[in-house]
């Protein structure tokens, strides 16, 4: 990451995937934002994809997009 920052380089996969092996209990959702490493930092993010865990669910998206699995309890699906 230091080299990427120093030289302004970024190498990302063409596609990113998430496969849920277990159900939604105690699993964080995946969030995908329409924002990439090369976008301006002050560019607002007006939307996002929120994918809740479900056993055997599989999602695929552009690997350059900002994504993660935030652990905040309020994002977990309630039964």
Image (tube, rainbow, N blue to C red):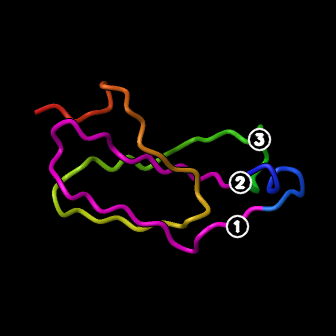
Q: Which residues are magenta?
A: 10-36
Residue located 41% across and 66% down the image: 17
Q: Which mark is residue 37?
A: 2
- Which x, y percent locates residue 1? 73, 51
Residue located 16% across and 57% down the image: 55
Q: Is residue 49 left or right of residue 75?
A: right
Dividing the picture into quadrants, the one containing residue 26 is: top left
In the picture, the quarter occupied by the C terminus is top left
Q: Which mark is residue 41?
A: 3
Question: Is 58 inside the magenta-drawn segment?
Answer: no
Q: Which residue is mark 1?
A: 11
- Which x, y percent locates residue 60? 41, 68
Q: Earlier in the sequence, mark 3 or mark 1?
A: 1
Residue located 15% across and 39% down the image: 25
Q: Which mark is residue 39?
A: none
Under circle 1, the secondary element is: loop
Under circle 2, the secondary element is: loop
2 or 1: mark nearer the eye: 1
Q: Is residue 43 left or right of residue 32?
A: right
Q: Earlier in the sequence, mark 2 or mark 1?
A: 1
What is the crowding at mark 2: few (fewer than 14 residues within 10 Å), some, or many (at least 20)? some
What is the crowding at mark 1: few (fewer than 14 residues within 10 Å), some, or many (at least 20)? few
Question: Are the residues flagged by discs 2 and 3 in contact, CB closer than 8 Å?
Answer: no
Distance of mark 3 from mark 1, alpha carbons?
18 Å
Under circle 3, the secondary element is: loop
Total numbered labels? 3
Question: Is 21 inside the magenta-drawn segment?
Answer: yes
Frontmost residue, 76 versus 42: 76
């Amino acid at each position: 990451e230091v080299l990427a920052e120093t030289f302004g380089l970024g190498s990302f996969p063409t596609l990113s995937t998430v496969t849920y092996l277990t159900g939604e209990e105690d699993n964080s959702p995946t969030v995908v934002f329409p924002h990439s490493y090369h976008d301006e930092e002050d560019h607002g993010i007006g939307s996002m994809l929120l994918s809740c865990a479900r056993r055997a669910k599989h999602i695929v998206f552009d690997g350059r997009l900002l994504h993660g699995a935030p652990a905040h309890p309020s994002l977990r699906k309630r039964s």
